[in-house]
Amino acid sequence: MENYNIYLLKIQQLLLKRKIIISIAVGLLASIIIATFTGFMNDCQEIRHSVFRLHILANSDTTEDQELKLKVRDKILEETGYLFKDVKSSKEAEKIANENMNKIIDVAQKEVYSQGYDYKVNAYVCNMYFNTRDYEQFSLPAGKYDALRVTIGDAEGKNWWCVLYPSMCLPTAKPKENLEKSNLEKSQTDIIEQPQKYKAQFAIVEIYESIKNKIFG
């Protein structure tokens, strides 16, 4: 009986050691995940602070209104895109947008009229929420961004978006080159250019930012 008790005690000690080792391993793994994700979250926040977006909202989702939205987009980029060509920061892009707001509205309004519509066009700079968005050569994580927002008519249709700084949607823009010239760190440009590497992180950020936006607006 005594030998049995000793044997049982040794088994219990081994199990305890195993639990301790597993707990330490799990703790280390959790720390690594948290540290990695915290870094990703911080990079996403820097991206939001360093980007100035263009957001155009159509009157409705009819084929005609959606086509009009794209014509307005083309005209804005064609006639005012040069204003943002050589800007050095998102704040400078925002300042230029505000200083030239009347011109931007006028260009868009004339295009609406020329297409035979009487929709009222409005434009303003705001800080607004975006879901994770994909645009040809790049993606941006969900969250609130400063943006030049252009609304057409009732503004109840699907939107079109792009990035004015770093210059990534102008007719002569070179997204990769302009990203490299921006104030973003390499880890941040990597997130924008290679989102497929961060699918899980993008999904988690979107859930978190969506909840935060619903609670705090």
Image (spheres, rainbow, N blue to C red):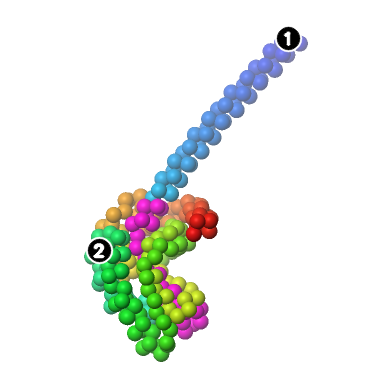
Q: Residue at x 50, y 56 (%)?
A: 216
- Residue 177 in sight in this render: no
Which quadrant holds the N terminus? top right
Percent across and percent down for residue 82 are: 25, 72
Judge whether residue 135 is colored magenta.
no
Q: Residue at x 51, y 78 (%)?
A: 61
In this orientation, does residue 1 appear? yes
Q: Is residue 13 left or right of residue 155?
A: right
Q: Nearer the viewer, residue 138 or 51?
A: 51
* Residue drawn at the location 42% of the way across and 75% of the way down: 151
Residue farthest along the top direction in this orientation: 2
Left/right placement of residue 153 relative to residue 73 reads right
Residue where numbered disc 1 is placed: 2
Mark 2 lies on residue: 87
The correct choice, above or below, for 9 with respect to 92 in the image is above
Residue nearer the viewer, 192 or 8: 192
